[in-house]
Image (cartoon, rainbow, N blue to C red):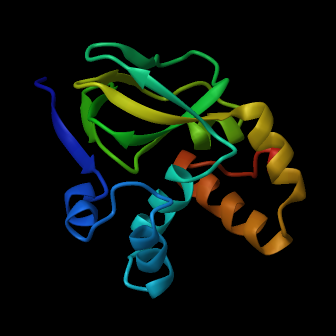
Amino acid sequence: MNKEVTATFAVDTDHLHALGVVDPYSPKSMELYSSGKLVSNERLYFTLWGSTELNTSLFNARARISTVGTPVSSAYFIISGSALGLQGNEIYRLGPGSVIGLAEGIGGLNYSMTVVAVSTVQVRVLPMYVISKLVTKMPSGLRGILKSTVMRTLNLDKPPALLL
């Protein structure tokens, strides 16, 4: 069976740059963020891009970001660059705004796909021990949204222990 691209996801960073957004802290960026003109994935991208709680890391082209079947110690949020996710015969094109390993990490599972950088990829690193601490402090409504999202993403019948 031939492998073919199953899905593609990327926030349109060219569109954001055209609006004058080049760094998450500039006055123009703050104005745009508070204007209500951004769609939800752009707002999430902005929030994680500008977070002072997360470290930044780079993966060179052809570097593995994750390997299927290995434990998730960190999840990754792509800021720039592109990667391919390989899951059986499916291939996913991943770009800015893509999140790697978060649902699996919260669900106590291993990485579900191998992800390889196509170009230099800048990521924000989300260590699972930090995520575990944050989840316990979340308001119940937000925790419920996270629980249903993780269960749907991973096709789980019962909530992961972290979200009980």
Quadrant of the image containing the N terminus:
top left
Which x, y percent locates residue 11?
Answer: 31, 57
Question: Looking at the image, is 153 positioned above or below residue 34?
Answer: above
Question: Looking at the image, is 130 positioned above or below residue 114?
Answer: below
The residue at the far front in this view is 27
Instruction: Tell me the residue at 41%/40% (across/down).
Output: 78
Number of numbered discs: 0
Q: Is any part of residue 67 visible from this angle?
A: yes
Q: Is any part of residue 164 visible from this angle?
A: no
Judging depth in this view, the residue of 120 and 2 nearest the camera is 120
Instruction: Tell me the residue at 44%/86% (across/down).
Output: 35
Which x, y percent locates residue 36?
Answer: 45, 86
Q: Quadrant of residue 63?
A: top left
Judging depth in this view, the residue of 88 and 48 nearest the camera is 48
Q: Is residue 144 rendered to the left or right of residue 81? A: right
Q: Is residue 164 rendered to the left or right of residue 47? A: right
Instruction: Tell me the residue at 78%/74% (across/down).
Output: 141
Judging depth in this view, the residue of 32 and 13 nearest the camera is 32
Which x, y percent locates residue 18?
Answer: 19, 66
Which x, y percent locates residue 29?
Answer: 42, 68
Q: Quadrant of residue 117?
A: top left
Instruction: Tell me the residue at 81%/50% (across/down).
Output: 134
